[in-house]
Image: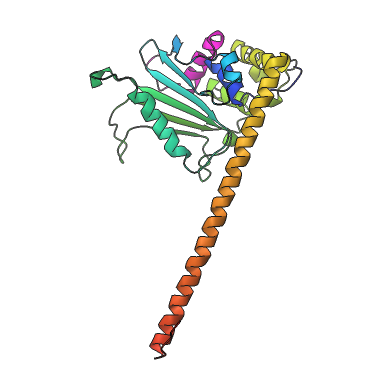
C-alpha cells in the first residue's frame, strides 16, 4: 500500500463494516464477536445506515456507528471509540436503550421487541482496573438470574488484547483492528490469510491509494486529533477548577478548626 491505514479511524471502520459491498464482512464480524451467544449464525443482514463515501467523508458530523437487522429481526449496533472519558458508560447504555426502543412505533405491542446487541471497540481502555479485554453486560439480577434474554452490550478493549496466536475468529478481528494500521498488504502474516481479512485489506488499500479517499482519511484523522485536544484541554480546565475548589474547602475547614480551638480556650475572635 502507498500509505498505512488505521482501520480504527471512523471513516475506515464504517467502510469496512457498514458498506453494502462489505456486507459479508459485517456478517463475519458479528458471528465472530457473538459466537456462542446466538441460537443460530447470522446468514444475512440489512444495513440500516449504510456507508456512503461521498456523504460521510464530506461531513464531520456523520453518524459513525453501524446498525443492522438480521433475518430474525434482531438488531445490531457496532461502534468504534478511540478515546475514553468519564461519561462514556452512560452514553453506551443510552445508545443501547435508544436503539432497542426505536423498534416500536406509537401503539405497537411490546411483543414486537427483538433482541438488540451493541458492540463497542475501544482504542483506549474503558475499565483500567480489570485486566480482561472483553466485557458482556445483560439484564440480570445480582444472583445472575436473567430478566429477559434480549441481547446486551459487548465491550472490547483493544489495548488489553494481547493474544499472539490466533485461535478464534473473534481474536482475528480484534488483532486486525489493533494492528491493521501496521500491516503491509504485500506481506500479510499467516493469521490474515483468509478471504475476509484479504477483503478487509482491500478496503484499507482503497483509502491508501485513491487520492480523494486518502485526503479524506487524513482530514478525519486531523478532526479526531482536534477533538481529542479540545477534550483534553477541557478536562485539564475541570481538573484545575476542582483543585481550586478543594483548596478553598481545605482553607475553610482549617479556619473553622482554628475558630473552634479559640472558642474552647475562651478566646473571643472577631474577624
Q: Position of residue 225 (x, y in %)?
A: 64, 35
Query: Which residue in the rendered view is the most extreme toward the bottom?
Result: 266
Q: Nearer the viewer, residue 58 or 78?
A: 58
Q: Is residue 73 inside the magenta stretch?
A: no
Q: Position of residue 258 (x, y in %)?
A: 46, 81
Q: Which residue lies at the image location 65% right of the left edge and 29% below the top edge?
A: 221
Q: Quadrant of the N terminus?
A: top right
Q: Nearer the viewer, residue 191 or 111?
A: 111
User: Quarter of the image holding residue 45?
Assistant: top left
Is residue 269 shown above or below 1?
A: below
Q: Nearer the viewer, residue 51 or 172?
A: 51
- The count of marks equals 0
Query: Which residue in the rendered view is the most extreme toward the front?
Result: 271
Q: Specify whether 186 is left or right of 243.
A: right
Q: Does any portion of residue 78 appear in the rendered image?
A: yes
In magenta, the rendered stretch is 19-41
Q: What kind of secondary structure does the magenta stretch mostly adopt?
A: helix
Q: Specify whether 102 is left or right of 107.
A: right
Is residue 142 shown above or below 35?
A: below
Q: Does any portion of residue 43 appear in the rendered image?
A: no
Q: Position of residue 24 (x, y in %)?
A: 52, 10
Amino acid at each position: 500500500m502507498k500509505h498505512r491505514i488505521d482501520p480504527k479511524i471512523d471513516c475506515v471502520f464504517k467502510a469496512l463494516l457498514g458498506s453494502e459491498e462489505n456486507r459479508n464482512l459485517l456478517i463475519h464480524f458479528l458471528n465472530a464477536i457473538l459466537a456462542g451467544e446466538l441460537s443460530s449464525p447470522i446468514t444475512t443482514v440489512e444495513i440500516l445506515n449504510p456507508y456512503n463515501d461521498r456523504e460521510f467523508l464530506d461531513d464531520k458530523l456523520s453518524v459513525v456507528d453501524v446498525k443492522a437487522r438480521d433475518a430474525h429481526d434482531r438488531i445490531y449496533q457496532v461502534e468504534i471509540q478511540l478515546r475514553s472519558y468519564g461519561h462514556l458508560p452512560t452514553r453506551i447504555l443510552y445508545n443501547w436503550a435508544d436503539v432497542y426502543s426505536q423498534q416500536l412505533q406509537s401503539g405497537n405491542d411490546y411483543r414486537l421487541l427483538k433482541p438488540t446487541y451493541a458492540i463497542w471497540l475501544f482504542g483506549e481502555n474503558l475499565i483500567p482496573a480489570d485486566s480482561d479485554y472483553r466485557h458482556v453486560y445483560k439484564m440480570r439480577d445480582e444472583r445472575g438470574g436473567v430478566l429477559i434474554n434480549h441481547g446486551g452490550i459487548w465491550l472490547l478493549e483493544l489495548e488489553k488484547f494481547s493474544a499472539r496466536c490466533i485461535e478464534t475468529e473473534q481474536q482475528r478481528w480484534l488483532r486486525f483492528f489493533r494492528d491493521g494500521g501496521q500491516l503491509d498488504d504485500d506481506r500479510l502474516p499467516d493469521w490474515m490469510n483468509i478471504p475476509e481479512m484479504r477483503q478487509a485489506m482491500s478496503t484499507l488499500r482503497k483509502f491508501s491509494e485513491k487520492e480523494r479517499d486518502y485526503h479524506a482519511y487524513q482530514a478525519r484523522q486531523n478532526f479526531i486529533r482536534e477533538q481529542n485536544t479540545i477534550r483534553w484541554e477541557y478536562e485539564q480546565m475541570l481538573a484545575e477548577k476542582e483543585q481550586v475548589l478543594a483548596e478553598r474547602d481545605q482553607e475553610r475547614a482549617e479556619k473553622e478548626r482554628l475558630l473552634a480551638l479559640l472558642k474552647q480556650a475562651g478566646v473571643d475572635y472577631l474577624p
